[in-house]
Image (cartoon, grey):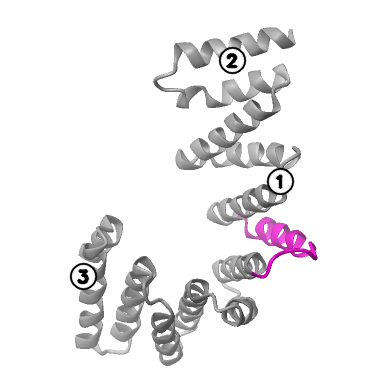
Amino acid sequence: LVQLHGKIARLYEKLFSENLVPYYETLYHHYKKSGSVKKSLYYLKKTIEKDIKQFSNENALSLMDELLKMRISKSERTEYSLKKGELLRHIGRYESALGLYESLLENRGIAGKIKAEIIKNMGQALWAMGKYDDALKKYDDAFLISSSAGDEKHTAEILEKRGMVFYNKGDYKRATEEFREALRHAKGENERTTSILSNLGLVLYRQGEYDKAMAHYLKSLKNAQATENLNDQALFLL
């Protein structure tokens, strides 16, 4: 029976070699039953990626749980745990995401950059729950780690997220300060710069500074066009 599953899997690969995407999960199960760990892990990852793209969220979560029970490297475990947390946040299961992040932080050997990423993600979950002060505390902790490590990319991201919290709290002056500081750290990061400029435009608009707001929106659009970012261009033109 074990050999039969292997033969079936190889037959699928041969017959549908031009497009295996619809058969990823079938191939995973057959290779799993055939005892081929390497092949089953490969198709399990492919299935998860496919399900996330197709918004088959519950199936993706279930398969990620299966993957996390397997013997995988420490980096893979961290990668898919973070993916799981992101998906949980995406579908509004914030408490579950926070629980996952808490368990990840219990790992004493976790690298500083990953720790900052986890804490930042906790801030995002709390922000989505409307717990703005708690979110700010997490962002502050993540900021200290990232800025101390000289990680400009993540520092800019965290500052922008802090700006969004202050925006939601109605503190437009502080939000403006955070966005401007984020912009300073985002040099060379075109996608981040586009987002920050757009948020600066939003908060300036809220303060009645319409000309300055439009100037920032136009800078954001110009940056999106330069990087051929169609999503950001479309959002501006809505």
Q: Is residue 46 magenta?
A: no
Q: Residue at x 55, y 79 (%)?
A: 150
- Quarter of the image for residue 60 reads top right
Asked whether 110 falls inside the magenta stretch, the response is yes
**Which of marks 1 and 3 precedes in the sequence?**
1
Q: Earlier in the sequence, mark 3 or mark 2?
A: 2
Q: Quadrant of residue 39?
A: top right
Q: CA distance from mark 3 to mark 1?
A: 42 Å
Residue 112 x/y as whole percent: 67, 70
Q: Amino acid at mark 2?
A: Ala
Report crowding for label 3: few under 14, some 14 to 19, many 20 or more residues within 10 A (C-alpha): some
Question: What is the tally of numbered marks visible in this picture?
Answer: 3
Tell me the chief SS of the magenta region: helix
| Residue 231 shown left or right of residue 74 in the figure | left
Q: Which residues are magenta?
A: 93-112
Q: Who is closer to the viewer here, 150 or 114? A: 150
Q: Earlier in the sequence, mark 1 or mark 2?
A: 2
Residue holding disc 1: 73
Q: Quadrant of the C terminus?
A: bottom left
The numbered dot on residue 31 is none
- The residue lying furthest to the bottom in this view is 173
Q: Position of residue 62 (x, y in %)?
A: 66, 38
* 4 w.r.t. 165: above or below: above
Residue indicated by mark 3: 222
Q: Which residue is mark 2?
A: 9
Q: Secondary structure at mark 3?
A: helix
User: The residue under label 1 is which amino acid type?
Assistant: Ser
